[in-house]
Amino acid sequence: MSSASVPSSYVASTPPRHGRNMAAVIVLIPVLVALALWAFAWPAARTAPRDLPLGVAGSVTATAPIEKQLAQQNGAFEIHRYADEAAARDAIEDRTVYGAIVATGQGPKLLTASAASPLVAQLLQQSVAGQAPEGTNVTTVDVVPAPAEDPRGAALTSSVLPMGLAGVAAGSIATLLGLRGFRAAGALTGTALFVGLVAAALTHSWLGILSGDWWVEAGALSLSTLAVSGAVAGLAALVGPPGIGLGAFLVVLLGNPFSGASSAPEMLPEPVGTIGQWLPPGAGASLLRSVSFFDGAAATGPALTLTWWAVLGLGAVLLGDTLKRRRSAPIKTVTAREPALVN
């Protein structure tokens, strides 16, 4: 084709458009990298206890020195007082506190729950041992131990991101395949149920990193997946394809590092720890720990959070379909008839 046959408007408009695309790539990628580093690296670099719930058990006279030492750690611990060791154990099993220091005649006794957070259990051991008088032997009892197959909780932590990705994938594929309304809601629900069964078979039956009721764990994993897939598909139904990116941003870029699954929400800088529990990955991790290791203690909050995400997401899918049908419906015109002439 000769240059004379090329429209002048095309020749004039091509360089500016290419230049804008180049500028967008050059600027957008570093911004995304900076955002990802902030979301993942900043909480990890600032991991430290902040109002971490910790119990102190014993008489007022015996526990006063312990409480004074803990109060000097700049708000690291939120102190809960208990009359004796039995009450402190109950509080740990109910997930009210992560551990407890019991004042005994032989010195402090530390109760931990590595199933709640191996990192927190290790931190408490180091903190109590460091504050004990020289030559004092601190007895440590793991009230709710982590599974022998996953003593550091690494496998449980590693399951948070795949579950989030499964939800993002389900919501994205349902949207891209053109599923709408009740068909989309049914596909997302069915997918979440199968994902939960497969995930429970892998984590509980094969790897042995979960030790609770198999079907309850499968239900928790299914609900976590549905919360994510519903949110992604719901956003896409309301705002179009950009909703997929927005859903992935909330779940992968924010939800995963803000979940506190590898440590604890109280170990993350504020308000990251709180925000993380409002998002599906954080709520899902907390729910899975509760139903797997603590007989469902403290499971209501994260279960409700995931349920709201799922309900609102599926509701957005149905609403988006309704709005699209109304916009695409043909407009009926009514032609006025002239009145009949009276003879």
Image: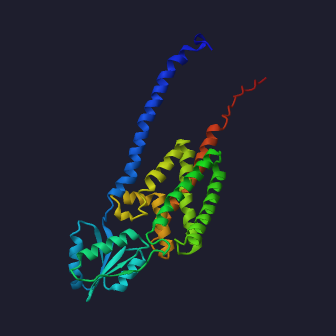
How many numbered marks, from 0 up? 0
Residue at left 62%, top 44%? 176
Please indicate whether residue 311 sits to the left or right of residue 26 in the image: right
Look at the picture and state if 126 lies above or below 27: below
Please indicate whether residue 210 sits to the left or right of residue 82 in the image: right
Specify the quadrant of the image occupied by residue 80: bottom left
Specify the quadrant of the image occupied by residue 264: bottom left
Q: State the residue in front, 84 or 208.
A: 208
Identity of the residue furthest to the right in this view:
343
Residue at left 49%, top 26%? 18
Residue 237: percent from left, percent from top: 57, 46
Specify the quadrant that holds the N terminus: top right
Instruction: Check the image and tell me how it is coloured.
Output: rainbow
Identity of the residue furthest to the bottom in this view:
105
Residue 66: percent from left, percent from top: 23, 78
Residue 43: percent from left, percent from top: 36, 56
Residue 138 seen from this side: yes
Q: State the residue in front, 135 or 47.
A: 135
Specify the quadrant that holds the C terminus: top right
Residue 183: percent from left, percent from top: 67, 52
Look at the picture and state if 208 lies above or below 162: below
Look at the picture and state if 39 lies above or below 66: above
Residue 296 seen from this side: no
Residue at left 47%, top 75%? 294
